[in-house]
Amino acid sequence: MQTIHTRVLQIAGSVITVSATGVGYNELAEVTSKRGTSLAQVIKIAGDLVSLQVFAGARGIATNDEVRFLGRNMQVSFSDDLLGRVFNGSGQPRDRGPALQGKAVDIGGPSVNPARRIIPRHMVRTGIPMIDVFNTLVESQKLPIFSIAGEPYNELLARIAMQAEVDIIVFGGMGLKHDDYLFFRDTFEERGALVRTVMFVHTAADPIVECQMVPDMCLATAEQFAVAGKRVLVLLTDMTNFADAMKEIAITMEQVPANRGYPGDLYSQLASRYEKAVDFEDAGSITILAVTTMPGDDVTHPVPDNTGYITEGQFYLKNGRIEPFGSLSRLKQQVNNKTRDDHRAIMNTMIQLYAQCRETQEKQSMGFLMSAWDLKLLKYGKLFEDKLMDLSVNIPLEGALDLCWQILGECFEKTEISLKPELIAKYWPAK
Amino acid sequence: MAVSVGRVAAVNSNIITVKFADKVIQNEVAYAVIGDKRLKSEVIRIRGEYADLQVYEDTRGLKQGDAVEFTGELLSAELGPGLLSRTYDGLQNPLNDLAAECGNFLQRGKYLPALDMQKAWEFTPTAKVGDEVEAGYWLGFVPEGIFKHQIMVPLKLRGTWKVKSIAPKGSYTVTEKIAEVESLEDGTVETVAMRQEWPVKLAINAYAERLRPLEPMVTQTRIIDTFFPISRGGTYCIPGPFGAGKTVLQQVTSRNADVDIVILAACGERAGEVVETLREFPELIDPRTGRSLMERTIIICNTSSMPVAAREASVYTAVTLAEYYRQMGLHVLLLADSTSRWAQALREVSGRLEEIPGEEAFPAYLESLIANFYERAGYVKLYNGEKGSVTIGGTVSPAGGNFEEPVTQGTLKVVGAFHGLSRERSDARRYPAINPLDSWSKYPNPVSEKVPEARAILRRGNEVSQMMKVVGEEGTSMDDFVLFLKSEFLDNAFLQQDSFDEVDAACSLERQRYVFEKMLSIIKTKFSFDTKDQARSFFLELTREFKNWNISPWGSEKCKAAEELLDKHVAERRA
């Protein structure tokens, strides 16, 4: 019983209102106008007035255009044929491939029962020492990359994706510049990763509603792969655009804004996406890496602030490097005792020394006299930044740990370092 | 079961407007029927012939005209033996049972009983036929783990009653009749079973009197017990920016606090954190009882991705369970993490109801709700003279780490202690990151009355350190410099505590008293130094030795040796 409604009562932003009965909340509809057919979703029912957000935007919709309710929720069709494909935020192919026929899966499904979650236990190796050694990424972790607009966050994201040991990559682009989208696609293709990748891409030129759908599409797909036993890495860039899309729609809907115009449910909305990260005892896992650009490098801006309360740490990208101080992986303790016996100790020692070096650098810039120890610290800081912090460095964890010892050996005497004697005996480099 | 039926008129996310026929009660529970599922909801506003309901589940698919069944009952918690060591969601659904039935994912519209209906409990009566009783009087008990779980006259009864019959010693399920009571006023007879219900938003007041919270609740965290103590029956809050260690502090407290029962309300926070507690507590042994920590714990968990409206219910469910165990003469600690998420849930609902927003769009009634919640803590004397308490500790997650926001400010007005976490301290890895200059407590100090002297040194040390940033070490006098080193020493060796070290993680009250005296005597000692470097390395050495002392088991040989070494060093440098 698909009724067609041909009277649109109100159009504001990308939201249209029609008079209809028997329509379910969140149900999908097709809106056919001169510009073609678009999907739309019910976001409010008030008596027989039904408001829908039109995925392609309301521009060009006439008051007598056709609205046909489909009687189902927004779904993503799932099958192994998804791999290697690129879709837009409403699940239409954007790579000229055929539309997919697979198992239809509702997006934004229920959350995992906390009683069925397990404590994360596997490290994800990335080959980037600032991550592997100092803030280890863990399977099932949800971790944002906090960054300001000009930083190479997309390059970092692509590199982690290429080097991480996972089965499937699900990529979600929100508000991407078109060249960034091409950058990701080409990188995946060149490195042979496209065959294990699904991409959902919304570019800055696409309708805003589709931006809002991207994370749900990605995560519903990822969940299906994970339940089928795959280790899935979900990449989302940029979540700030997602939040801004939400803000735009909320304001069009005349919702009362909370902080800086964002809707009051920003925290819950972000959390319901990030909390999809999971490690199943008897199946695969979902790990989420997301870019959150911070307007004005302000970590107290509502988007990074709410994100920080939800995620399990963050990588803080500044001046083209992952900052050791603002960055944090809350889950590293779960795995870095199982890698190599010197991992935890060396991690702490290196960071403490680098912190001291930063203080010395400040003292130096203020014109204070440098002691012999200060000079050692400055040398250490330089080596640390060049050999470990530089983003082009690409070595496995064990190599990076050896490199740490080598740097310590180059700069300091054994007695100056507060490490356990057994570790020093085992790893201190011979001169 | 349905008292009356209404029809859905409007749907806006988790708020539905329902046209009702005869009557509705404010805050009564209703079920929205969608196919074969029934979605639990609560009436939150009534206007004319329409009622607004918040739905505790995802509302997708709900249509105009769908039936809504009103129950005539307020949202209630199930009370009775078998609550301990369980994990519930905000509406008191047992999560393990749900997992067994539905698998990995939560299903909407699925509700299971909170108590095990089949299990038989060994009941021993203590009341006699003819006893005059009131709501909350003990009738008998069943063993629940290490506790005597008292079976009470139903809390909902009013007036004075007489025990008409009582079951003999034996085993009964929670729904079987164990007694009958007869009203002395109108002769009505009520049947009593172990299981009873209580509306979560109302406080349980079945006690003789409420006393001042003067008895300490020892947490074994030095900076709390010595500097900012908490009393049993008191309230405290822990505001802090993300990553400052709120959750770790709560976890440590839940392990070491000197109370009978701990209730953890994970309200709108990460599921991963609950999982750590869930998986680790059964393995951890409670040193006081020798049993698993889980046996004294209840977890109410409504994590951030679970339905928002149930988040609000979760803190009330948790405090109701706490009050129930208090009625048995037990000391209960309720840890709520985080009350900001609860406030945000209120804000979301208020926004959808199009209420006039207050500060930062939080509803205007936020402060009174926060005050009501914390006022449910208390130290009480029961009718039979036994004493019990509910202590509430809530974390607050202020936006941007700025304490000048409505939730933090609303909370500070009503709590008895404030443990403010600071980003500077956590960045400097000074854990627990409680700021010793800003925090306060109004409860009596169980460790020493000389604590203000130590705080004065911290404050003056801080002033010197601020000054040193401007004039440098060279421009600071030796006296000031030593004062600064002493305050750093006090901070490093006493305030900071390693929660991952087996010994240091828990510092007994006796030990704190002794160690604090020692610390105070050291920082009041006059030392003489030739150079500032000499002073610095002396205090560094002292810090290391003091920390070594902290991680030696109390009373052990190692501990005595560490103390002697410390004394020797202090004596060498005394002026």
Image (cartoon, helix red, strand yellow):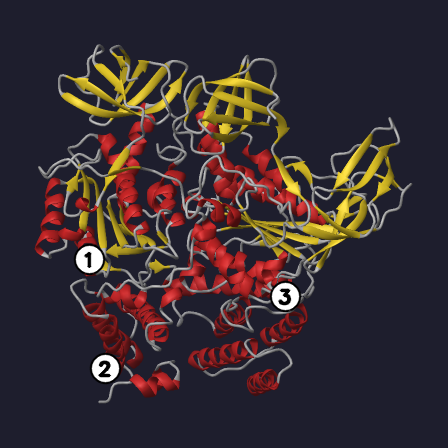
Give the percent coordinates (x, y) of residue A330: 39, 59
Please say whether residue B235 is visible from this viewpoint. Answer: no
Give the percent coordinates (x, y) of residue A195: 14, 52
Measured Cα–Cα span from mark 1 to mark 3: 52 Å
Type of residue at label 3?
Arg
Of B314 and A283, the residue lying toward us: A283
Residue, x 33% and y 20% (percent of image)? A51
Where does label 2 land, which residue? A410
Where does label 1 land, which residue? A320
Q: Which of marks 1 and 2 is nearer the N terminus?
A: 1
Looking at the rendered structure, whether the residues under marks 1 and 2 are on a common chain is answered as: yes
Compared across the picture, whether B426 is left or right of A276 comes to right
Compared across the picture, whether A75 is left or right of B153 comes to left
Give the percent coordinates (x, y) of residue B231: 68, 55
Give the percent coordinates (x, y) of residue B51: 53, 19
Which subunit holds the residue at mark 2?
A
Measured Cα–Cα span from mark 3 to mark 2: 52 Å
Q: In which quarter of the image is residue B410?
A: top right
Please say whether residue B381 is visible from this viewpoint. Answer: yes
Residue, x 35% and y 69% (percent of image)? A336
Residue, x 21% and y 10% (percent of image)? A64
Q: In which quarter of the image is residue B133?
A: top right
Q: Residues within 10 Å of mark 1 (few under 14, many from 20)?
A: some
Q: How crowded is mark 3: few (under 14 residues within 10 Å), some or many (20 or more)?
A: some
Which subunit holds the residue at mark 1?
A
Where does label 3 land, which residue? B291
Q: What element carries label 1?
A: loop
